[in-house]
Image (cartoon, rainbow, N blue to C red):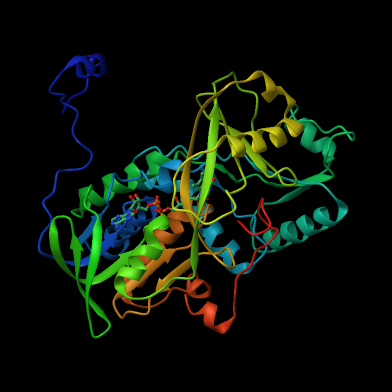
Amino acid sequence: MKYSAFSLLRNGFDRDSRWPSILPSVTPKDRYDIIIVGGGAHGLACAHYLARNHDITDVLVLDSAWIGGGNTGRNTAIVRSDYLLEASFKLKNFSLELWKSLSQDLNYNVMYSPRGYIDLAHSDGELEHFMCRANAMCLSGARAEILSPQQIESLEPSINLHTKSRFPVSGGLFQPDGGVVRHDAVAWGFARSAGRAGIDIVQNCGVSGFGVRNRRINWVQTVRGKIHCDKVLITAAGASSELARLAGFELPVEMINVQAFVSEPVKPVLDKVINYNAGLAYISQTGKGELVMGGATDGYPSFARRGSFARIEDTLVRALQIFPFLSNLRLMRHWSGTADIPMDGNAIVGKSPLENMYLNCGWGYAGFKATPAVGWTMAELLATDRLPDLLAPFALDRFKSGALIDDSGIGPYPWLH
Ligand SMILES: Cc1cc2nc3c(=O)[nH]c(=O)nc-3n(C[C@H](O)[C@H](O)[C@H](O)COP(=O)(O)OP(=O)(O)OC[C@H]3O[C@@H](n4cnc5c(N)ncnc54)[C@H](O)[C@@H]3O)c2cc1C
Protein backbone atom coordinates (compact mmCIF):
# COMPACT_ATOMS: atom_id res chain seq x y z
CA MET A 1 0.00 0.00 0.00
CA LYS A 2 1.28 3.49 -0.89
CA TYR A 3 1.03 6.27 1.68
CA SER A 4 0.54 9.92 0.76
CA ALA A 5 0.55 13.03 2.89
CA PHE A 6 -3.26 12.80 3.12
CA SER A 7 -3.57 9.05 3.70
CA LEU A 8 -3.97 9.46 7.47
CA LEU A 9 -6.88 11.88 6.96
CA ARG A 10 -8.43 9.78 4.21
CA ASN A 11 -8.26 6.61 6.28
CA GLY A 12 -9.71 8.44 9.25
CA PHE A 13 -12.89 9.16 7.26
CA ASP A 14 -12.90 5.98 5.20
CA ARG A 15 -15.46 3.43 6.44
CA ASP A 16 -13.51 0.59 4.82
CA SER A 17 -10.13 1.63 6.10
CA ARG A 18 -7.22 0.71 3.85
CA TRP A 19 -4.70 0.41 6.67
CA PRO A 20 -3.19 -3.06 6.50
CA SER A 21 -4.00 -5.05 9.64
CA ILE A 22 -0.95 -5.81 11.82
CA LEU A 23 -2.38 -9.22 12.69
CA PRO A 24 -3.91 -11.37 9.97
CA SER A 25 -7.15 -13.06 10.98
CA VAL A 26 -6.29 -16.70 11.62
CA THR A 27 -8.33 -19.87 12.09
CA PRO A 28 -6.24 -22.10 14.36
CA LYS A 29 -5.07 -25.46 12.99
CA ASP A 30 -5.75 -28.75 14.83
CA ARG A 31 -2.13 -29.14 15.86
CA TYR A 32 1.02 -27.09 16.50
CA ASP A 33 4.57 -27.81 17.65
CA ILE A 34 4.24 -25.18 20.36
CA ILE A 35 1.26 -23.43 21.93
CA ILE A 36 1.91 -20.26 23.93
CA VAL A 37 -0.94 -19.51 26.35
CA GLY A 38 -0.99 -15.75 26.93
CA GLY A 39 -0.52 -12.99 24.37
CA GLY A 40 1.14 -10.50 26.69
CA ALA A 41 4.54 -9.06 25.85
CA HIS A 42 6.31 -12.12 27.33
CA GLY A 43 4.40 -14.65 25.21
CA LEU A 44 4.72 -12.53 22.07
CA ALA A 45 8.45 -11.95 22.66
CA CYS A 46 8.93 -15.69 22.99
CA ALA A 47 7.08 -16.22 19.70
CA HIS A 48 9.26 -13.60 17.98
CA TYR A 49 12.53 -15.15 19.21
CA LEU A 50 11.36 -18.69 18.35
CA ALA A 51 11.09 -17.55 14.74
CA ARG A 52 14.06 -15.20 14.69
CA ASN A 53 16.64 -17.22 16.63
CA HIS A 54 15.50 -20.81 16.02
CA ASP A 55 13.52 -20.75 12.80
CA ILE A 56 10.54 -22.35 14.58
CA THR A 57 7.22 -21.04 13.30
CA ASP A 58 4.72 -23.86 13.83
CA VAL A 59 3.59 -21.92 16.88
CA LEU A 60 0.20 -20.68 18.12
CA VAL A 61 -0.18 -17.78 20.55
CA LEU A 62 -3.58 -17.74 22.29
CA ASP A 63 -5.06 -14.93 24.33
CA SER A 64 -8.39 -15.02 26.13
CA ALA A 65 -8.81 -11.28 25.46
CA TRP A 66 -6.72 -8.93 23.30
CA ILE A 67 -2.95 -9.00 22.98
CA GLY A 68 -1.15 -6.70 25.37
CA GLY A 69 -4.38 -6.08 27.32
CA GLY A 70 -3.14 -7.77 30.50
CA ASN A 71 -0.38 -6.44 32.74
CA THR A 72 1.64 -5.54 29.64
CA GLY A 73 -0.70 -2.68 28.77
CA ARG A 74 -1.31 -1.76 32.42
CA ASN A 75 2.21 -1.29 33.73
CA THR A 76 4.14 1.91 34.31
CA ALA A 77 6.65 0.92 31.61
CA ILE A 78 9.82 1.25 33.71
CA VAL A 79 12.92 -0.68 32.65
CA ARG A 80 16.13 -0.97 34.69
CA SER A 81 18.58 -3.55 36.01
CA ASP A 82 19.74 -2.05 39.34
CA TYR A 83 19.46 -5.30 41.32
CA LEU A 84 21.91 -6.64 43.87
CA LEU A 85 21.41 -10.39 43.49
CA GLU A 86 23.28 -11.83 40.54
CA ALA A 87 20.36 -13.81 39.09
CA SER A 88 18.03 -10.78 39.04
CA PHE A 89 20.70 -8.42 37.77
CA LYS A 90 21.96 -10.63 34.95
CA LEU A 91 18.53 -11.38 33.44
CA LYS A 92 17.35 -7.77 33.64
CA ASN A 93 20.65 -6.40 32.38
CA PHE A 94 20.53 -8.73 29.38
CA SER A 95 17.03 -7.33 28.81
CA LEU A 96 18.34 -3.77 28.99
CA GLU A 97 20.87 -4.63 26.29
CA LEU A 98 18.07 -6.02 24.11
CA TRP A 99 15.82 -2.98 24.74
CA LYS A 100 18.53 -0.75 23.29
CA SER A 101 18.27 -2.27 19.81
CA LEU A 102 14.72 -3.64 19.91
CA SER A 103 13.22 -0.96 17.65
CA GLN A 104 15.77 -1.82 14.94
CA ASP A 105 15.33 -5.56 15.51
CA LEU A 106 11.54 -5.33 15.11
CA ASN A 107 11.59 -2.44 12.62
CA TYR A 108 8.93 -0.98 14.92
CA ASN A 109 9.51 1.96 17.25
CA VAL A 110 9.08 0.75 20.83
CA MET A 111 10.21 4.15 22.11
CA TYR A 112 12.92 3.03 24.53
CA SER A 113 13.72 6.21 26.43
CA PRO A 114 16.91 5.80 28.53
CA ARG A 115 16.24 8.91 30.56
CA GLY A 116 17.73 7.50 33.77
CA TYR A 117 16.22 5.95 36.90
CA ILE A 118 16.87 7.33 40.38
CA ASP A 119 16.15 5.37 43.54
CA LEU A 120 16.04 7.77 46.50
CA ALA A 121 17.69 6.81 49.82
CA HIS A 122 16.43 8.20 53.10
CA SER A 123 18.97 7.05 55.66
CA ASP A 124 22.69 6.31 55.90
CA GLY A 125 21.93 2.60 56.10
CA GLU A 126 19.87 2.71 52.93
CA LEU A 127 22.55 4.70 51.12
CA GLU A 128 25.16 2.15 52.15
CA HIS A 129 22.98 -0.59 50.72
CA PHE A 130 22.64 1.40 47.49
CA MET A 131 26.44 1.64 47.35
CA CYS A 132 26.63 -2.18 47.46
CA ARG A 133 24.19 -2.34 44.56
CA ALA A 134 26.08 0.30 42.57
CA ASN A 135 29.40 -1.50 43.15
CA ALA A 136 27.94 -4.86 42.18
CA MET A 137 26.46 -3.34 39.01
CA CYS A 138 29.72 -1.61 38.03
CA LEU A 139 31.72 -4.80 38.64
CA SER A 140 29.35 -6.58 36.25
CA GLY A 141 29.83 -3.95 33.56
CA ALA A 142 26.66 -1.85 34.05
CA ARG A 143 26.67 1.89 34.62
CA ALA A 144 25.60 3.06 38.10
CA GLU A 145 26.32 6.15 40.21
CA ILE A 146 25.66 7.23 43.78
CA LEU A 147 24.26 10.77 43.81
CA SER A 148 24.40 13.35 46.61
CA PRO A 149 21.20 15.31 47.37
CA GLN A 150 22.75 18.30 45.53
CA GLN A 151 23.41 16.19 42.43
CA ILE A 152 19.83 14.89 42.54
CA GLU A 153 18.54 18.45 42.76
CA SER A 154 20.59 19.56 39.77
CA LEU A 155 19.23 16.63 37.73
CA GLU A 156 15.62 17.09 38.92
CA PRO A 157 15.01 20.66 40.18
CA SER A 158 11.31 20.01 40.85
CA ILE A 159 12.10 17.54 43.63
CA ASN A 160 11.62 18.62 47.28
CA LEU A 161 14.90 17.96 49.11
CA HIS A 162 14.33 20.13 52.15
CA THR A 163 15.65 18.60 55.32
CA LYS A 164 12.32 19.43 56.99
CA SER A 165 10.43 17.08 54.66
CA ARG A 166 8.90 13.95 56.15
CA PHE A 167 11.63 11.64 54.82
CA PRO A 168 14.73 13.74 53.99
CA VAL A 169 16.69 12.43 51.03
CA SER A 170 20.24 11.35 51.86
CA GLY A 171 21.25 10.41 48.33
CA GLY A 172 20.27 8.20 45.45
CA LEU A 173 21.25 5.34 43.17
CA PHE A 174 21.26 6.45 39.56
CA GLN A 175 21.12 4.07 36.61
CA PRO A 176 21.57 6.23 33.49
CA ASP A 177 20.46 3.41 31.14
CA GLY A 178 17.18 2.85 33.01
CA GLY A 179 14.06 4.54 31.72
CA VAL A 180 10.77 3.70 30.07
CA VAL A 181 9.59 1.83 26.97
CA ARG A 182 6.20 2.25 25.32
CA HIS A 183 4.48 -0.92 26.57
CA ASP A 184 1.75 -1.36 23.95
CA ALA A 185 4.25 -0.75 21.14
CA VAL A 186 6.28 -3.61 22.60
CA ALA A 187 3.31 -5.98 22.42
CA TRP A 188 2.40 -4.92 18.88
CA GLY A 189 5.99 -4.87 17.66
CA PHE A 190 6.60 -8.44 18.81
CA ALA A 191 3.19 -9.55 17.50
CA ARG A 192 3.76 -8.03 14.08
CA SER A 193 7.16 -9.63 13.76
CA ALA A 194 5.95 -13.06 14.91
CA GLY A 195 2.88 -12.85 12.65
CA ARG A 196 4.99 -11.93 9.63
CA ALA A 197 7.26 -14.91 10.33
CA GLY A 198 4.21 -17.19 10.02
CA ILE A 199 3.29 -17.68 13.68
CA ASP A 200 -0.46 -17.76 14.35
CA ILE A 201 -1.80 -15.31 16.94
CA VAL A 202 -5.43 -15.72 17.96
CA GLN A 203 -7.23 -13.28 20.27
CA ASN A 204 -10.44 -13.88 22.23
CA CYS A 205 -9.54 -17.55 22.46
CA GLY A 206 -9.04 -18.52 26.10
CA VAL A 207 -7.67 -21.84 27.30
CA SER A 208 -10.03 -23.62 29.70
CA GLY A 209 -8.41 -27.03 30.11
CA PHE A 210 -5.62 -29.41 29.18
CA GLY A 211 -5.59 -33.01 27.99
CA VAL A 212 -2.98 -34.61 30.27
CA ARG A 213 -1.81 -38.22 29.95
CA ASN A 214 1.34 -39.78 31.49
CA ARG A 215 2.45 -36.37 32.73
CA ARG A 216 2.31 -34.93 29.21
CA ILE A 217 -0.02 -32.36 27.69
CA ASN A 218 -1.61 -33.74 24.52
CA TRP A 219 -3.99 -30.93 23.77
CA VAL A 220 -5.33 -27.67 25.09
CA GLN A 221 -9.04 -26.98 25.35
CA THR A 222 -9.97 -23.59 23.92
CA VAL A 223 -13.23 -21.81 23.20
CA ARG A 224 -12.58 -22.82 19.57
CA GLY A 225 -12.13 -26.50 20.37
CA LYS A 226 -9.23 -28.84 21.17
CA ILE A 227 -5.83 -28.03 19.72
CA HIS A 228 -3.04 -30.63 19.91
CA CYS A 229 0.58 -29.73 20.51
CA ASP A 230 4.05 -31.04 21.39
CA LYS A 231 4.85 -28.32 23.92
CA VAL A 232 2.93 -25.70 25.90
CA LEU A 233 4.16 -22.51 27.50
CA ILE A 234 2.01 -20.90 30.19
CA THR A 235 2.75 -17.18 30.30
CA ALA A 236 -0.48 -15.68 31.54
CA ALA A 237 0.59 -13.56 34.56
CA GLY A 238 -2.52 -13.08 36.75
CA ALA A 239 -4.10 -16.31 35.43
CA SER A 240 -1.07 -18.56 35.86
CA SER A 241 -2.20 -20.21 39.12
CA GLU A 242 -5.59 -21.04 37.59
CA LEU A 243 -4.02 -22.52 34.45
CA ALA A 244 -1.62 -24.61 36.56
CA ARG A 245 -4.59 -25.90 38.54
CA LEU A 246 -6.29 -26.91 35.29
CA ALA A 247 -3.12 -28.83 34.36
CA GLY A 248 -3.16 -30.61 37.72
CA PHE A 249 -0.51 -28.88 39.86
CA GLU A 250 -0.24 -25.90 42.17
CA LEU A 251 1.94 -22.83 41.84
CA PRO A 252 3.29 -21.00 44.92
CA VAL A 253 1.98 -17.62 43.75
CA GLU A 254 -0.51 -15.14 45.16
CA MET A 255 -2.56 -12.78 43.00
CA ILE A 256 -2.56 -9.18 44.20
CA ASN A 257 -4.14 -6.08 42.70
CA VAL A 258 -1.70 -3.31 41.69
CA GLN A 259 -2.81 0.17 40.68
CA ALA A 260 -1.37 3.01 38.65
CA PHE A 261 -2.62 6.40 37.47
CA VAL A 262 -1.82 9.39 35.26
CA SER A 263 -2.33 13.12 35.63
CA GLU A 264 -3.49 15.52 32.97
CA PRO A 265 -0.71 16.36 30.49
CA VAL A 266 1.59 19.29 31.26
CA LYS A 267 4.75 20.70 29.72
CA PRO A 268 7.99 18.76 30.43
CA VAL A 269 8.64 19.00 34.16
CA LEU A 270 10.20 15.68 35.12
CA ASP A 271 13.10 14.27 33.17
CA LYS A 272 14.01 11.08 35.04
CA VAL A 273 12.08 8.19 36.54
CA ILE A 274 12.05 8.74 40.31
CA ASN A 275 11.38 6.12 42.94
CA TYR A 276 10.54 7.62 46.33
CA ASN A 277 11.47 4.61 48.43
CA ALA A 278 10.32 5.72 51.85
CA GLY A 279 7.06 7.08 50.46
CA LEU A 280 6.13 3.98 48.42
CA ALA A 281 5.52 6.10 45.33
CA TYR A 282 7.22 6.31 41.96
CA ILE A 283 6.74 8.72 39.10
CA SER A 284 7.75 9.52 35.53
CA GLN A 285 6.45 11.75 32.74
CA THR A 286 5.21 10.43 29.40
CA GLY A 287 6.04 11.91 26.01
CA LYS A 288 2.49 13.32 25.98
CA GLY A 289 3.16 15.15 29.25
CA GLU A 290 1.13 13.03 31.69
CA LEU A 291 2.68 12.19 35.04
CA VAL A 292 2.50 8.41 35.54
CA MET A 293 2.43 7.25 39.15
CA GLY A 294 2.34 3.99 41.01
CA GLY A 295 2.48 2.91 44.62
CA ALA A 296 2.13 -0.07 46.91
CA THR A 297 -0.01 -3.09 46.11
CA ASP A 298 -3.47 -3.54 47.63
CA GLY A 299 -1.81 -5.72 50.23
CA TYR A 300 -4.22 -8.67 50.17
CA PRO A 301 -4.74 -11.47 47.63
CA SER A 302 -7.39 -10.75 45.02
CA PHE A 303 -8.24 -11.43 41.38
CA ALA A 304 -10.27 -8.21 41.23
CA ARG A 305 -8.79 -5.87 38.66
CA ARG A 306 -10.08 -2.60 39.98
CA GLY A 307 -8.88 0.67 41.42
CA SER A 308 -9.68 2.23 44.77
CA PHE A 309 -9.72 5.80 46.04
CA ALA A 310 -7.93 4.72 49.20
CA ARG A 311 -4.86 3.64 47.23
CA ILE A 312 -4.89 6.77 45.04
CA GLU A 313 -5.08 9.02 48.08
CA ASP A 314 -2.43 7.07 49.90
CA THR A 315 0.04 7.19 47.00
CA LEU A 316 -0.60 10.81 46.14
CA VAL A 317 -0.21 12.01 49.72
CA ARG A 318 3.25 10.47 49.67
CA ALA A 319 4.15 11.59 46.13
CA LEU A 320 3.29 15.18 47.15
CA GLN A 321 5.91 15.06 49.88
CA ILE A 322 8.62 14.75 47.28
CA PHE A 323 6.96 16.57 44.35
CA PRO A 324 4.82 19.39 45.80
CA PHE A 325 4.06 20.71 42.28
CA LEU A 326 1.72 17.72 41.80
CA SER A 327 -0.86 19.47 44.00
CA ASN A 328 -1.73 21.68 40.99
CA LEU A 329 -2.57 18.75 38.73
CA ARG A 330 -5.72 16.75 38.17
CA LEU A 331 -5.76 12.98 37.82
CA MET A 332 -7.07 11.81 34.46
CA ARG A 333 -7.22 8.03 34.59
CA HIS A 334 -6.43 5.15 36.83
CA TRP A 335 -6.39 1.38 36.37
CA SER A 336 -5.03 -1.81 37.86
CA GLY A 337 -3.65 -5.23 37.01
CA THR A 338 -3.39 -8.60 38.69
CA ALA A 339 0.17 -9.25 39.78
CA ASP A 340 1.24 -12.87 40.41
CA ILE A 341 3.72 -12.94 43.28
CA PRO A 342 5.66 -15.89 44.76
CA MET A 343 6.89 -15.83 48.35
CA ASP A 344 10.40 -14.55 47.44
CA GLY A 345 8.93 -11.99 45.05
CA ASN A 346 10.83 -13.32 42.07
CA ALA A 347 9.69 -14.98 38.87
CA ILE A 348 9.19 -18.67 38.18
CA VAL A 349 10.59 -19.50 34.76
CA GLY A 350 11.48 -22.87 33.29
CA LYS A 351 10.06 -26.37 33.32
CA SER A 352 6.83 -27.35 35.07
CA PRO A 353 6.09 -30.65 36.85
CA LEU A 354 4.70 -31.88 33.50
CA GLU A 355 7.13 -33.09 30.84
CA ASN A 356 6.20 -30.82 27.97
CA MET A 357 4.71 -27.84 29.81
CA TYR A 358 6.85 -24.77 30.52
CA LEU A 359 6.20 -21.87 32.88
CA ASN A 360 6.80 -18.16 32.87
CA CYS A 361 5.01 -16.45 35.75
CA GLY A 362 5.44 -14.82 39.14
CA TRP A 363 6.73 -11.55 37.73
CA GLY A 364 4.53 -9.56 40.09
CA TYR A 365 4.80 -6.00 39.09
CA ALA A 366 8.37 -6.09 37.89
CA GLY A 367 8.26 -8.22 34.78
CA PHE A 368 7.91 -5.72 31.96
CA LYS A 369 11.59 -4.80 32.10
CA ALA A 370 12.52 -8.46 31.60
CA THR A 371 10.35 -8.92 28.49
CA PRO A 372 12.97 -9.30 25.72
CA ALA A 373 15.32 -11.40 27.88
CA VAL A 374 12.49 -13.70 28.95
CA GLY A 375 11.35 -14.05 25.34
CA TRP A 376 14.88 -14.82 24.19
CA THR A 377 15.70 -17.38 26.89
CA MET A 378 12.25 -19.05 26.92
CA ALA A 379 12.52 -19.47 23.14
CA GLU A 380 15.90 -21.15 23.66
CA LEU A 381 14.45 -23.48 26.29
CA LEU A 382 11.47 -24.42 24.10
CA ALA A 383 13.65 -24.93 21.03
CA THR A 384 16.45 -26.94 22.63
CA ASP A 385 14.92 -28.27 25.87
CA ARG A 386 18.09 -27.09 27.65
CA LEU A 387 17.67 -24.57 30.47
CA PRO A 388 19.71 -21.42 29.67
CA ASP A 389 22.07 -20.38 32.50
CA LEU A 390 20.22 -17.08 32.90
CA LEU A 391 17.00 -18.94 33.76
CA ALA A 392 18.39 -21.70 35.98
CA PRO A 393 18.02 -19.76 39.29
CA PHE A 394 14.33 -19.05 38.55
CA ALA A 395 13.27 -22.71 38.43
CA LEU A 396 10.13 -23.81 40.28
CA ASP A 397 12.07 -26.34 42.38
CA ARG A 398 13.82 -23.51 44.28
CA PHE A 399 10.79 -23.54 46.59
CA LYS A 400 11.68 -27.14 47.49
CA SER A 401 15.44 -26.67 47.71
CA GLY A 402 15.21 -23.34 49.56
CA ALA A 403 17.45 -21.53 47.03
CA LEU A 404 15.14 -18.50 47.02
CA ILE A 405 16.05 -15.31 45.14
CA ASP A 406 14.92 -12.70 47.60
CA ASP A 407 15.79 -9.16 46.52
CA SER A 408 13.83 -7.72 49.46
CA GLY A 409 14.42 -4.08 50.08
CA ILE A 410 16.03 -3.55 46.69
CA GLY A 411 12.90 -2.42 44.94
CA PRO A 412 10.44 0.19 46.07
CA TYR A 413 8.73 -2.06 48.59
CA PRO A 414 10.12 -4.52 51.09
CA TRP A 415 8.54 -7.56 49.51
CA LEU A 416 8.14 -6.55 45.89
CA HIS A 417 10.56 -5.82 43.13
C1 LIG B 1 0.00 -1.38 37.71
C2 LIG B 1 1.20 -2.15 37.27
C3 LIG B 1 2.42 -1.48 37.09
C4 LIG B 1 3.56 -2.20 36.67
N1 LIG B 1 4.71 -1.50 36.42
C5 LIG B 1 5.81 -2.16 35.95
C6 LIG B 1 6.98 -1.43 35.61
O1 LIG B 1 7.01 -0.19 35.68
N2 LIG B 1 8.06 -2.13 35.20
C7 LIG B 1 8.06 -3.49 35.11
O2 LIG B 1 9.09 -4.08 34.78
N3 LIG B 1 6.93 -4.20 35.36
C8 LIG B 1 5.80 -3.58 35.77
N4 LIG B 1 4.64 -4.27 36.02
C9 LIG B 1 4.64 -5.75 35.82
C10 LIG B 1 4.48 -6.11 34.37
O3 LIG B 1 3.41 -5.43 33.78
C11 LIG B 1 4.26 -7.63 34.23
O4 LIG B 1 5.20 -8.33 35.00
C12 LIG B 1 4.41 -8.05 32.77
O5 LIG B 1 3.66 -7.22 31.93
C13 LIG B 1 3.96 -9.48 32.60
O6 LIG B 1 3.85 -9.72 31.21
P1 LIG B 1 3.12 -11.01 30.71
O7 LIG B 1 3.19 -11.02 29.23
O8 LIG B 1 3.69 -12.19 31.43
O9 LIG B 1 1.64 -10.87 31.26
P2 LIG B 1 0.34 -10.14 30.68
O10 LIG B 1 0.67 -8.92 29.91
O11 LIG B 1 -0.62 -10.01 31.81
O12 LIG B 1 -0.19 -11.20 29.61
C14 LIG B 1 -0.87 -12.35 29.99
C15 LIG B 1 -1.96 -12.59 28.97
O13 LIG B 1 -2.55 -13.86 29.23
C16 LIG B 1 -3.90 -13.77 28.84
N5 LIG B 1 -4.64 -14.86 29.50
C17 LIG B 1 -5.06 -14.97 30.77
N6 LIG B 1 -5.72 -16.11 30.97
C18 LIG B 1 -5.72 -16.77 29.78
C19 LIG B 1 -6.25 -18.00 29.35
N7 LIG B 1 -6.94 -18.82 30.17
N8 LIG B 1 -6.09 -18.37 28.06
C20 LIG B 1 -5.39 -17.56 27.19
N9 LIG B 1 -4.87 -16.37 27.57
C21 LIG B 1 -5.02 -15.98 28.85
C22 LIG B 1 -4.33 -12.39 29.30
O14 LIG B 1 -5.46 -11.94 28.58
C23 LIG B 1 -3.07 -11.56 29.04
O15 LIG B 1 -3.15 -10.85 27.81
C24 LIG B 1 3.48 -3.60 36.44
C25 LIG B 1 2.26 -4.26 36.62
C26 LIG B 1 1.13 -3.55 37.01
C27 LIG B 1 -0.17 -4.28 37.16
List x then y, in percent, for residue 185.
Answer: 38, 39
In front of the other: 129 or 196: 129
Q: Is residue 383 visible?
A: no
The quarter of the picture where the C terminus appears is bottom right
List x then y, in percent, for residue 22.
Answer: 23, 39
368 lies left or right of 406: left
What's the residue at 59%, 67% (across, down)? 344
In front of the other: 6 or 396: 396
List x then y, in percent, for residue 3.
Answer: 21, 22
The quarter of the picture where the N terminus appears is top left
Q: Is residue 79 visible?
A: yes
**Residue that extends furthest to the bottom in the rendered view of this protein:** 214
What's the residue at 56%, 55% (across, down)? 300
Image height of 17 relative to 106, above or below: above
Image height of 271 relative to 110, above or below: above
List x then y, in percent, for residue 308.
Answer: 54, 38
In front of the other: 305 or 55: 305
293 lies left or right of 244: right
Q: Quadrant of residue 274?
A: top right
Image height of 34 relative to 77, above or below: below
280 lies left or right of 27: right
How many numbered callouts? 0
What's the residue at 64%, 33% (across, down)? 313
